[in-house]
Every structure is written in structure tokens, then in C-alpha cells.
Amino acid sequence: MGAAAAGGAAAAVGARALRGPGRPVLRAGWGGGCRRLWALSGRAAAAASPPAGASSGSGALSPFDRRLKRKQKNWAALQAEPAKCDYLREEVGGRIADRVFDITRTFPLALDVGSGRGYIAQHLTKETVEKLIQVDIAENALKNAVESEIPTVSVVADEEFLPFKEDTFDLVVSSLSLHWVNDLPKAFREIHQVLKPDGVFIGAMFGGDTLYELRCSLQLAELEREGGFSPHVSPFTAVSDLGHLLSGAGFNTLTVDTDEIQVNYPGLFEVMEDLQGMGESNCSWNRKPLLHRETMLAAAAIYREMYGNSDGSVPATFQVYYMIGWKFHESQARPAQRGSATVSFGDLAKIDGLLSRGKK
């Protein structure tokens, strides 16, 4: 999402701003055995390389450099205190888990696509999910996963090339990972394929208004200092397109909603440092490799002037899309056939008159 980071440590400040004073930290799980399977399948290995036509850096076929994204996530997972920058992922992971709890059933086998360090698993219980497969492109994130009470198996693979058989999982979840895939429709089709009939997919991804403050500040600074600008925040999917993409992949009974999380930071440099610590630095093929010092200082000043809070901090907005889709099964409720209604909507206008007559 962001550009390369610089500046002082701000993870603790960001975490406090998100959680708020006096708010308890989300439960980190009870621990439990976790066996791991390290298997980068042939399909996943192929996915780690840029497709034909993208190696030139044009991004005509694939907007993101998946090799670079893997390096960024691996680097973030190896930091001395990776949890310091996990506050946003933990928050959204908890909200995904809440949606899982809303479904009154037990899932024998679940899949977490783009699991990272296990931000959803730490909030789930054995009563809801009996076994969880965690998939991520970054092996270091899986090796340093947080503890969970659910038995888990970790698999290194790409979100677009899931190495599982059709009709395998009762539940698939994904949190803040799918915005980096090159072919989102294909990723949705892969998820739909590995779901069992009557299985459910619950996911979250960043939306188009994410980091609009950072994007505008960098663009204005570059226009002023360099006479033009290049993208420093990755492109995002519009919420109006999500329903069509999920429906096209075969999902039904769709639910899509949006939410915004605002985090306050000391300044622009701290925002960018935390993005790097999250593994969310920009990996677009058409990204600009270097920002000049004068441009960065100008962007920091513009950020504070345009969006700064009264206490001297600056906000960073993260828009999150939540989506739920089901795989078809005969037992699911279906809409009646067109023209089968026995009552006209025009009769609704007569109800008040019939009720008033009955009272008399």
C-alpha cells in the first residue's frame, strides 16, 4: 500500500490510537499443538514468478510484483517485534472471527487464505472450527504464527493457486490479503472450487479510500517539487465490483459491507514505517523506486496541514470491505420462480383500509 518507510518508531502509538484508552487487547488464544507442512507446490512456485509480459515492469498483465510482496512479508515477519505493527490485522481478524461466530454451526475443516501470522485463528475456538489450514506466500510469517487453540497446518502457497482438491473445506476465511493478488476473479474461483457445497467464504480486503490522506499528500508534493507524480499507493477494487466478482465466481446469498478504521500517528514518516512493518509497502510494477528527500518533507508538511488533528497527530484511514458468499447446495433457500407470486404489491395499499375496518 505505502512507499518505502523512514522515521521513528510509531507502532505503539498506532496501536494505542486504534484500540483507544482502556480498551482490552484482543485475546491471543490458549496455545496448542501446531504441526506444519512446508510444501510450495509447482503451481504456487509458478505464481511466485511474474507472468509473461510482466517481467519488463510494465504491469500490463499483472499490476503487482508477487516476488517483491513475498520478500516484504517475509522481512516484516522477521523483525524483532513483529506484533508491534499487527494491531490493524488483529482488529480485522477479530471482526472476521465475529462473522464466523454468527453462523451457528461447527466447521470440521477450514482454510485461511493469506493467513500471515494467524490473525484470524487466534480469535477462533475449537467449538467453532475443529481444524484450520493456513496458507500464505511468506514462509516466515507462517513460521512465526501466533498461538491458537485450534490444531493448524501451515502451507506455503499462492492465494491464486490453491493446492487443494475440489470440495475440501467447510469454511474459507481471508483477511487483508486479497488486495495484493494479480487476478482477483481467479482467486475467488479458486476459493469457490475448494469449498464444499453449502460451504461459506468470509473475507476482508482493503477498499478504495484506504490511505487517501497519504496518497493525496504524496501526489501534491511530487507535483510541486518534481512536476508530476507516480503511484505510491496500490490500486484497490471498488465495492460496487465485489458483488459481481463473487457472483461470477459462483457464490450466492452474497453480503458485502464496508467499514473504516482510522489510526492516528505522529506524522507521515511513522505511517509509512508502520506500513512497512505490516508488510504492506507498495509492490506495483509501475511504482517509483525512490522518493527525493525534499519531496518527502513537503509531503509530510502537506499531510499535517491538510489532515492534521488538533493534538498534532495525523490520521490514516483504512477502508475495509467485508464479504460473505455461499457455495450452492440443494438445501439452501432459493427465490421463487418469476411470476409465481399469488399476491400483488398493489394490494399492499389496501391493507390499512382492511385493518381499520376490522377494528370497527
Image (tube, rainbow, N blue to C red):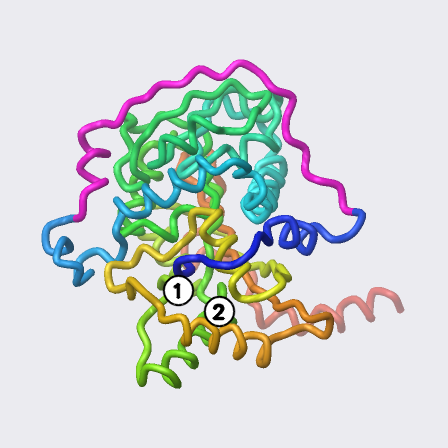
Residue 213 percent coordinates (x, y)? 52, 71
Q: Nearer the viewer, residue 200 or 12?
A: 12
Q: Nearer the viewer, residue 329 or 111?
A: 111
Residue 24 lies in what quarter of the image? top right
Locate residue 98 relative to residue 278 in the image: left or right. right
Q: What is the count of numbered marks?
A: 2
Please state the extent of the stretch shown in magenta in the rendering: 23-50
Instruction: Please state which amino acid type lies under the numbered disc 2.
Output: Leu
Q: Residue at x 62, y 40 (%)?
A: 98
Residue 10 percent coordinates (x, y)? 60, 54
Locate residue 243 relative to residue 349 in the image: left or right. left
Q: Residue at x 66, y 67 (%)?
A: 313
Answer whether labels 1 and 2 touch (C-beta < 8 Å): yes
**Residue annotated with mark 1:** 233
Main SS of the magenta part reads: loop
Helix, strand or loop at disc 2? Answer: helix
Locate residue 70 relative to residue 330 in the image: left or right. left
Helix, strand or loop at disc 1? Answer: loop
Residue 352 percent coordinates (x, y)? 75, 71
**Residue annotated with mark 2:** 214
Instruction: Please state which amino acid type lies under the numbered disc 1.
Output: Val
Q: Residue at x 56, y 39 (%)?
A: 83
Mark 2 neighbour class, 10 Å CA radius: few under 14, some 14 to 19, many 20 or more: many
**What whole-number distance in Å separates the C-alpha atoms at marks 1 and 2?**
8 Å
Q: Nearer the viewer, residue 213 or 225?
A: 225
Q: Please determine whether, in this image, residue 120 is positioned above or below residue 339.
A: above
Residue 235 lies in what quarter of the image? bottom left
Q: Is residue 103 magenta?
A: no
Q: Is residue 29 magenta?
A: yes
Q: Nearer the viewer, residue 186 or 31?
A: 31
